[in-house]
């Protein structure tokens, strides 16, 4: 099992790269799609991690290749995190501006909260 | 009859309004790839309809731009980050070329040859050829330090020249926008609402965004105000405030080494130091290189620099070993003399170790027969000094090390640090490119979306964010676990 670790990590990275593509255009709908893709990646890497714990013996070549793939995966996950946070920052800042435009500023100098009204969101 | 004529007139007006809409659409198509252009739309306003006096129809309303200034500002911020990372890659690539670790050139090559020559001298301590080789290889070591210091000095000069050029570009681009502001001030609302002027201003702002971090605000009269880092005015109305670049020795904290390579300072038009406001974009990366990265290696007003530390440490250690030995047994025994010289003082005698690497040399008065081979002991060892010198290659005591490692490793650590910074910058370019693409997509998403819709998107986004954020946290942890299980390479 552990001997296939590079291929498993590679598949997980492909999933994360797909999620990154979704995060490039971060609308709410694409984020729902992104979550499903990330869930796949979590399952793949969980299998790899468990397999590695059970059978940690790898030839030096395979270990080296797996290490490189794991680092690539780590970079992709960090990129996904940065993109997700940047998208949230965009919307939060937009919300703050809208608050300032619609409600002015609070006594402590922050933009007023935006009244978003109520909506029912059905999850699942 | 009168009504029929009025009706015909009304129809002609409506056709005229639709004709204007078509012209706007045609203009949008024609400018589809014009830099900075945002699509325009013409509002059609219904006319009152109450026959027989008000016959209805439409009239052309105001022109509306699909541009969202907030989204544009976000894109410019990400472009600034991309410009910074791209410039950092260029900077670190140049620096990495100076610190070659292949072992076939430069300081590591010269050090290796020197250690081999002293090892050969240790085998035949009285052999004149072996002694001559030690002197030749010591000269090569000194020259390798000199050349590396010289290359760093050249890179520092190139970086400063590039900084001046970048500042000039900033001033030129701001000057272009100043000209548009002047046109708007002279022509009034016609120019302020002209999509061509608007496109040119935004194209110029986009160009500026890769160079510096700034905020741009459109004023009520249609002019654009530009503040460097949101603080320092670069353009207000028709008044441009140009930047300049100087080489200076900082006054606060005061420079320790007054003749070391100076720092680069960016000044506002009134002479104020605004270097701290230039922390991003290409200019930010250039300043980071000349005021932080290069001084840490070649020395600067407040630091010795790792290359000088290495040159001085190596010269002092070799000299200490040679002067602790004897050239001949005597009687009386003839003590050894130092091999290396370097300057570590200013002309007034004050300490300045930032010259060490550039001035390192072999003392021309040292001839092969003046190299001390005898360690007086006790017990006396006829080749003790060459053996001790050879041990510097693989040190076994703190006295033979520099910062806890061998001289070759110390050099390797400098090169590794440069390589790591280069890789970080390369990764940063990749991430910033995706952030720029994301910001471009966000512009498309918000274009034409009204405020209520956008508010709703923000709420839904925050809900979707939580799920994704948790999954990425789990993924990150699992990836780290896997890396730990695989061990370090």
Image (cartoon, coloured by chain):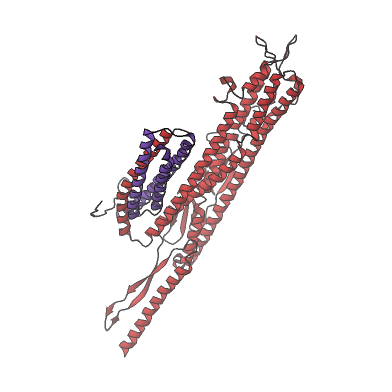
Nearer to us in this view, B126 or B52: B126
* Residue plotted at (57% across, 29% down): B409
Q: Is there any visible trace of residue B352 in the rendered image?
A: no
Which quadrant would residue B306 be assigned to in this image? top right
Chain letter for the red colouring in the rendering: B
Q: Nearer the viewer, residue B28 or B288?
A: B28
Residue B461, image x and y in percent?
32, 52
Location of residue B119 in the rendering, given as x and y in whole percent from the top left corner: 67, 22
Picture coordinates of residue B349, whole percent (x, y): 65, 27
Q: Is residue B71 left or right of residue B400?
A: left
Instruction: Say whether residue A1 is visible.
Output: yes
Nearest the viewer among A118 and B255 is A118
Question: On screen, A120 above or below B122?
Answer: below
Residue at far bottom of view = B1
Quadrant of the frame with the N terminus of chain B: bottom left
Q: Is residue B194 left or right of residue B172?
A: left
Above or below B49: residue B219: above
Q: Is residue B105 left or right of residue A97?
A: right
In the rendered image of this protein, which colour is used for chain A?
A: purple
Q: Where is residue B142 shown, x and y percent of the image?
A: 68, 30
Quadrant housing residue A72: top left
Count of labels in the image: 0
């Amino acid at each position: 099992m552990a001997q296939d670790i590079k291929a498993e990590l590679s598949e997980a990275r492909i999933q994360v790269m797909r999620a990154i593509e979704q995060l490039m255009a971060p609308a709410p709908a694409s984020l729902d799609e992104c979550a499903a893709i990330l869930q796949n990646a979590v399952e793949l890497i969980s299998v790899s991690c468990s397999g590695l714990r059970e059978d940690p013996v790898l030839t030096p070549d395979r270990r080296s290749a797996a290490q490189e793939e794991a680092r690539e995966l780590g970079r992709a996950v960090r990129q996904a995190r940065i993109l997700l946070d940047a998208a949230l920052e965009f919307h939060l800042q937009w919300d703050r501006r809208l608050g300032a435009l619609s409600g002015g500023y609070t006594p402590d100098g922050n933009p007023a909260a935006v009244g978003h009204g109520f909506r029912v969101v059905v999850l699942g | 009859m009168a009504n029929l004529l009025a009706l015909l007139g009304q129809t002609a007006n409506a056709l005229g309004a639709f004709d204007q809409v078509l012209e706007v659409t045609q203009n949008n198509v024609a400018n589809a790839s014009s830099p900075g252009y945002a699509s325009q739309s013409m509002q059609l306003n219904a006319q009152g309809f109450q026959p027989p006096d008000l016959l209805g129809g439409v009239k052309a309303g105001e022109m509306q731009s699909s541009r969202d200034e907030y989204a544009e500002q976000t894109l410019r911020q990400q472009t600034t980050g991309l410009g910074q990372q791209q410039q950092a890659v260029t900077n670190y690539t140049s620096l990495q070329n100076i610190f070659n670790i292949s072992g076939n050139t430069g300081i590591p090559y010269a050090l290796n040859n020197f250690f081999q020559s002293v090892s050969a001298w240790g085998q035949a301590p009285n052999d004149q050829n072996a002694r001559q080789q030690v002197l030749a290889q010591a000269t090569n070591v000194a020259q390798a330090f000199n050349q590396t210091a010289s290359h760093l000095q050249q890179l520092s000069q190139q970086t400063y020249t590039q900084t001046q050029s970048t500042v000039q570009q900033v001033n030129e681009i701001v000057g272009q926008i100043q000209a548009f502001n002047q046109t708007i001030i002279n022509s009034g609302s016609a120019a302020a609402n002209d999509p061509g002027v608007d496109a040119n201003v935004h194209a110029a702002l986009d160009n500026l965004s890769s160079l510096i971090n700034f905020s741009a605000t459109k004023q009520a009269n249609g002019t654009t105000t530009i503040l460097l880092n949101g603080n320092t005015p670069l353009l207000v109305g028709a008044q441009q405030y140009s930047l300049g670049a100087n080489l200076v020795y900082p006054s606060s904290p005061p420079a320790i080494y007054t003749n070391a390579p100076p720092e680069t300072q960016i000044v506002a038009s009134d002479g104020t130091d605004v270097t701290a406001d230039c922390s991003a974009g290409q200019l930010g990366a250039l300043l980071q290189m000349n005021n932080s990265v290069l001084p840490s290696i070649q020395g600067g007003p407040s630091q010795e620099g790792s290359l000088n530390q290495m040159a001085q440490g190596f010269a002092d250690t070799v000299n200490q070993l040679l002067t602790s030995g004897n050239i001949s047994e005597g009687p009386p025994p003839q003590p050894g003399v130092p091999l290396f010289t370097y300057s570590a003082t200013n002309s007034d005698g004050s300490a300045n170790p930032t010259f060490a690497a550039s001035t390192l040399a072999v003392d021309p008065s040292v001839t092969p027969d003046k190299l001390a081979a005898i360690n007086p002991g006790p017990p006396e060892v006829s080749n003790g000094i060459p053996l001790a010198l050879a041990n510097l290659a693989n040190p076994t005591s703190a006295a033979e090390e520099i910062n806890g490692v061998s001289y070759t490793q110390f050099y390797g650590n400098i090169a590794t640090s440069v390589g790591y910074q280069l890789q970080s910058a390369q990764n940063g370019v990749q991430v910033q490119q995706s952030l720029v693409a994301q910001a471009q997509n966000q512009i498309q998403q918000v274009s034409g979306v009204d405020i209520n819709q956008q508010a709703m998107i923000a709420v839904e986004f925050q809900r979707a964010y939580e799920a994704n954020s948790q999954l990425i946290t789990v993924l990150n942890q699992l990836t780290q676990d896997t890396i730990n299980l695989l061990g370090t390479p």
